[in-house]
Image: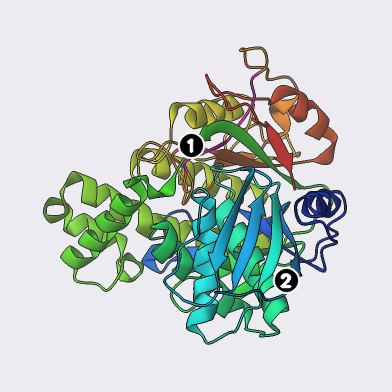
Amino acid sequence: MKWKTTMTHQHDRAGGVFRDLFGRQPQIAAAAPGRVNLIGEHVDYCGGFVLPMAIERETVIVAARRTVVAGEPVARVHSTACHETVEIPLGTRASRPRGGGGWSQYVAGVVAGFVDRGVVIPPFDAVIDSTVPLGGGLSSSASLEVAVATLVIALAGHAIEPVEVALLCQQAEHEFAGVPCGVMDQCASALCVRDHLLLLDCRSLDIVQVPFNRPDLLVLVTNSNIRHALNNGEYAQRRSDCQRAAAILGVASLREATLGQVEAFRDELGDTGFRRARHVVTEIARTQAAAVALFEGDWDALGGLMAESHESLRSDYEVSCAELDLLVILNRSAGVGPDRHADDRRRVWWLHGDAPRGRGGGDGDDGGCAGLSAGGRPRLHDVHDAAGGRSAGACMGGCQQARSLNDCVGTMFDAAPCVASDPPADAEGLYGT
């Protein structure tokens, strides 16, 4: 993988758990980052353009080969987040993990992908430790999948190209986790490089690394702590809506459709189909325009596109939630977006997290990131530095993203603990990247 990681404290923590569980030192470490998508939500499975970036939150795995014992070779894998250890058979493709929760299906799916390719995986023990929030729209599942794939490549000595890694991991999510996801998340985790956004054509898988390294700009991700689950049916329903709309329009996917076509077939599409198709077609156009704005340094245009994206996700795609909408309203009332004062030169782009499936804006896990509340009451001091924001991930809960000058970051951290009415015990508020 091209993503570099220092793996210091997190690596040490995973190593300590490994020694406690297995009584020896780990030999190999692998890691893969989470991601946040600046713009281009719910278009990857329609062959559209997306613009994600890797974040510092990542999944780290430490492991060691194990002496072969009698019987079928297995991997013993422990999750520090779920406090579970499972056994995953390595000899047959169809084998499911023994014990454990849903997280183990992602691991087993990746292992199965390598077995399908004839790769012989030696028995091993492993500990997984992740700082990517679960169900927060930052793609904890793809981070886990790509980290497992990276580990297997090292253990088996069988290198494959990063794009093939992404496709293998996508297949694992389809077949073992039951989520018909697009390929954006896996490509972001496998292909992103530092100080760049990844402009990905999800139809051809062509990529352009877009420079994104101004020292006075920072992406902030705030956590609404409304968690989501992509396998609860709403994600699959959105994808089905798009497939039905494409069939009515007579195109292979909505990537081939135009806004004129969508408007001309409004009656045939019905209200829901029309709004789903309109979101996809306009979101693809917004993503392409955002890439141009980034290359030209037109931050006001980028902020406006992100604001339009959230409104489309909220109204047309119906994947936002009240908590995320509140964050967007608070940000805009504080000066975020294209209607802020022209003399305000400091910029923030907020990425709000996911929303409960069927209610908010993004591409992946229900739950998420958003902020701007303290002691039950919103605080808006010094947030006038913001310039644009929207929900992040598959929405239906989750995270919000923004970009800011470094001089206002401390105040934002103070002002953004949580907006969820009943946040989980491990709730976190705001991440900077």
- Residue 369 included in the magenta stretch of the image: yes
* Residue occupied by mark 2: 66
Colour scheme employed for the rendering of this structure: rainbow
Q: Say which element carries label 1.
A: loop
119 vs 181, left or right, is right
* Residue occupied by mark 1: 397
Residue 265: give x, y in percent of width and height.
16, 58
**322 or 405, which is in the foreground?**
322
Q: Magenta part mainly helix, strand or loop?
A: loop
Q: Earlier in the sequence, mark 1 or mark 2?
A: 2
Residue count near mark 2 (Cα–Cα under 10 Å), binned few <14, some 14–19, many ≥20 = some
Residue 3 sits above or below residue 385 on the image: below
**340 or 188, which is in the foreground?**
188
Of badges 1 and 2, nearer the viewer stands 2
Q: Quadrant of residue 268?
A: bottom left
* Residue that sits furthest to the left in the current view: 268
Residue 367 sits above or below residue 365 on the image: above
Q: Which residues are magenta?
A: 366-373
Asked whether the beta carbons under mark 1 and mark 2 sit within 8 Å of each other, the answer is no
> For the residue marked with disc 1, what is the amino acid?
Gly
